[in-house]
Image: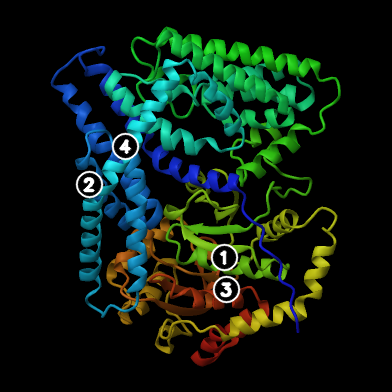
Amino acid sequence: MATETVAKPRTSMRVHVQKFGTFLSGMIMPNIGAFIAWGFITALFIPAGFFPNAELGKLVGPMITYMLPLLIGYTGGRMVYGVRGGVVGAVATMGVIVGTDIPMFIGAMILGPLTAWIMMTLDKIWEGRVKPGFEMLIDNFSAGIVAAAMAVVGMLVVGPIVKAFSNGASAVVEFLVTNGLLPFTSIFIEPAKVLFLNNAVNHGILTPLGTQQALEQGKSILFLLEANPGPGFGILLAFSFFGKGLAKASAPGAAVIQFVGGIHEIYFPYVLMKPMTIFAAIGGGMTGIFTLVVTGAGLRSPAAPGSIIAVYASTARDSYVGVTLSVLFATTVSFLIASVVLKASKAPAEDDLDQATHRMEALKGKKSSVSAALIGEGVGASGVAVLATPIKNIVFACDAGMGSSAMGASVLRNKIKAAGFPDVKVTNSAIANLTDTYDVVITHQDLTERAKPATASAVHVSVDNFMNSPRYDEIVELVEASNTEPGATEAAPAAAAAGTATAEAPAAAEAEAEEGPAGILVAESVVLNGHATTRDAAIDEAGQLLLDRGAVDSGYVDAMHEREESVSTYMGSFLAIPHGTNAAKDHIMKSAVSVVRYPNGIDWNGKEVKFVVGVAGVNNEHLHILSSIAKVFTNKAQVAQLEAATTVDEVLALFGKVNS
């Protein structure tokens, strides 16, 4: 039978530039504090500083020459391949540092990720082919050889190339300043900000060049080309006086967030709502840069975020007047132009602020972490959050990422597939490993506050019952709402139901054919009548079965108790799955699962538990068993079969072959 192939839509150049800029920003932004520390030390202790001190001034050179590039190289490598990538990236960065006489930020941004990628690629080549007992030897020596080789490449090849590029870029900047052309860069910078294309320029070129310039001259104008809060502040002030409806009402609060908080993103929807106001941003930006050129003002270090507080904290000693005038004049010009645009706009706006915010999120490619300040928390009448873009990536996070999160992810994955959205990815992770790349983050209610800082742009859902939380149905509604075209909402559930006999059957067959690693759950680790009468004793009993298997050492059982004290592992449906903390993974020798049944039930923090499943997992080897367990405990009939089981084989059969 012929099948129709739908061409995959091409990703626009804008999206590619956004992703590249985000990657560059990811290397610089975590280290902005180090840049600021260097800026403070420079301002205080160099001969021209506030408190000249020759001894303390010795910190300035090594920090910018070695510390900052090494931090960037490590961060870039870690982004690509975790700590292992960070280590080899930092070693390789040392090569470009030694091979040149200028700060090697751009070299670090190249070699750090590149070396980590090479290491990751090589590891994949011999993954699974190393004989037991030689893993550590191969890992350490391969990392050492790759890092050493790339350090040499950095010193002999990358360093000279980057130095030539830096010299050329510096010459271009000097040409623009000398000929009075630097203000015209706002023609490109201000629209790029609204389209989220500024990071590639700001963090890829301006910050490295500005830092080099600051080292030589004590300050740099380049740090304030993009970070000046004046243009955006002027636009928001204009909306506060001459805007209409929600835009006028929300603009004052947005102005405070933008000017003091430094979150420039918050004024982008206003520009998208009235595109002509982009000329206000350009005019304000040009005025601010012109003022800096005339007064010779600049910053010692990057101002991030672009708050007036961060700007003044980074201002050079002789530049406070110039920087103040730059922000003031930029705000004034931007305000005047935006006011004219708004007053001249007689026809009502085609789009309201809500729609403009959604367009901004579409440009950004994900939910905006500050959009709630403009349009609320994004919750519709049904109480379900609404995203501007389709939900494609959901993560269930817990402390260790091996037990609770795996079970919850399995339950939710089945529900979303049953709703007709098999392409939505549902994964599990340790909270420590979360990144801001998810659309929805689900955590136990006691862990939500820990997860939010790492995933600020995601929708966060808190649950207290991992197996059958009513919030799962809300999430399914959210997936349906965000992935269904307007007008097709009613058709989606019907299509999902109609497709059950065809689409679900292959999926079920595939799931049933999937084989988990042999020996994860064996008959010796299943007890039908547990002896424990308390929660802690039950944890010991389940942990002892793991110990008897040689899967863990005693330290892991201690960690199971530690995990239980911080967050309960009660899952609902009479089930608890005690497991160790994330830090206890070193105590696991191999993956194993134990199952203990308590026919009379035991008290588990006020909940009745009849089944205790002890979990110890290496990588993802145990997830197949946990998925089977989750399917059983979301089915009341199968839970009843477990309660009535008289042999261990019946339990193994239920967990080994499950039809959801």
Foreground mark, 4 or 1? 4
Disc 1 target residue = 409
Q: Choose the circle earlier in sequence order: 3 or 2.
A: 2
Q: Is residue 39 above or below residue 426?
A: above
Q: Choose the circle earlier in sequence order: 4 or 3.
A: 4
- Which dot marks residue 164? 4
Quadrant of res 3: bottom right
- Which dot marks residue 630? 3
Residue at the image point whose x is 37% and y is 51% from the top:
113
- Give how far apart the Cα atoms at labels 4 and 3 are: 59 Å
Q: Which amino acid lies under the numbered mark 2 shown in the image of this protein? A: Met
Asked if the residue at tag 3 contacts the one at tag 4, i.e. Cβ–Cβ closer than 8 Å, the answer is no
> Which structural element holds mark 1?
helix
- Give how far apart the Cα atoms at labels 3 and 2 are: 54 Å
Q: Which amino acid lies under the numbered mark 4 shown in the image of this protein? A: Ala
Asked if the residue at tag 2 contacts the one at tag 4, i.e. Cβ–Cβ closer than 8 Å, the answer is no
> Which structural element holds mark 4?
helix
Foreground mark, 1 or 3? 1
- Crowding near pointer 2: few (<14 within 10 Å), some, many (20+)? many
Foreground mark, 1 or 2? 2
Q: Which amino acid lies under the numbered mark 3 shown in the image of this protein? A: Ala
- Which dot marks residue 155? 2
Say whether residue 96 is left or right of residue 295: left
